Image (cartoon, rainbow, N blue to C red):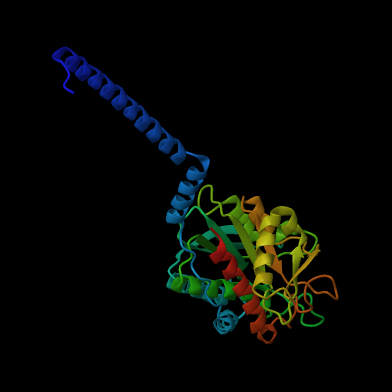
Amino acid sequence: MVLSGQFKNKAISVSLLLWEKVSEGRMRLCSIYMLVIFLAACSPEKEKQAESEATKTSEVKKVPTPDFNADSAYSLVKAQVDFGPRIPGTAAHAKCADYLVAKLKSAGFDVIIQNGTVQTFDKKQFSLKNIIASYKPEAQSRILISSHWDTRPWADEDTKNKDKTFEGANDGASGVGIALEIARQISFSKPNIGLDIILFDLEDYGTNGNENSWCLGSQYWANNPHKPNYFANFGILLDMVGGPNAIFPKEKKSVDMASFAVDKVWKAANEIGYGNYFVPQTKDFVGVDDHVFINKGGVPCIDLIEYNQTSGGFGDYHHTHQDNMSLIDKNTLKAVGQTLLEVIYSEK
């Protein structure tokens, strides 16, 4: 059948109209389809997925925790003791300061000596030297490790020769030795965070009954921080950390001032098999120590310090002639040093 011209024109018009409608419908369907895709892409699930992928991309790869070398730490303790008692104002004190600075610099740390004049309880004036070393000083996320490097001038807790000097192998040198070995390990295996090591002077030149006569180096630092508005995520003070079969409870002031840091350290110790050293009990046996003043300086800090289960206080060697190299145990150095490395390399 053949259509007439009039009908043919009408048919063409109808066909065009239908085509326009179909095309319009297709465009609408296409628009709806694109909208659905857009909304799906913007759904919470997709957003979470996108955020997760972005986080994975930007996340810094964890650096494996290195092995703490207890033999090296032991030699670093002995090197300090070999100078003689590091009593402020003596040649041994000055020579040991040079040694500590050189060791920290050799590990790639930025090192400064904070000098200051302080008066001791017996009215003597001393020029203190706080040795401050920094790895990644520009990093906002950082940990502070500290110890004191001076030696008490007298073995006044002994039963004989109370006015004589002693080596101070555990009370002072052990914590410094561990800190130096940590710095050495960092020179080989770079953690993602910053680290500061502060070796405080004139911690042990105090008298009983006057808490403010102790810890003169950390008191000075707390009032005169080496950097304006200095802050670290948390700090760990090492004091008497090299004795055989040492027990480290959760020191009460540490729990009161920085319980989250206590939890981090004790958790790490237990996870790597040193729970026999880091026991879960909380003990109130420290009158004052550097961590008290570090906290006053604005950094939440804990005290890792040996506890004598028999006496309920410090070890029998404390401020006696027994505090010599025969006291230093490599197993204890390893337990403490490896735990601290685990904490440092796990921090984000």
Residue 312 rendering spot, x and y as whole percentages: 84, 70
Q: Which residue appears at 52% of the width and 74% of the height?
A: 66
Residue 322 rendering spot, x and y as whole percentages: 74, 83
Q: Nearer the viewer, residue 31 or 248?
A: 31
Visible residue check, residue 130: no
Residue reaching furthest to the top = 6
User: In the figure, residue 130 lies in which quadrant?
Assistant: bottom right
Residue reaching furthest to the front = 1
Residue 38 rendering spot, x and y as whole percentages: 41, 36
Q: Which residue appears at 75% of the width and 64% of the height?
A: 250
Q: Which residue appears at 41% of the width and 38% of the height?
A: 37
Quadrant including the N terminus: top left
Residue reaching furthest to the bottom = 326
Q: Nearer the viewer, residue 2 or 200?
A: 2
Residue 40 rendering spot, x and y as whole percentages: 46, 39
Q: Nearer the viewer, residue 55 or 333?
A: 55
Reply above or below: 47 against 219. Answer: above
Residue 309 appears left or right of 24: right
Reply above or below: 19 against 160. Answer: above
Q: Which residue appears at 66% of the width and 55% of the height?
A: 293
Residue 327 appears left or right of 95: right
| Number of numbered discs on residues | 0
Visible residue check, residue 296: yes
Q: Nearer the viewer, residue 39 or 175?
A: 39
User: In the figure, residue 163 lies in which quadrant?
Assistant: bottom right
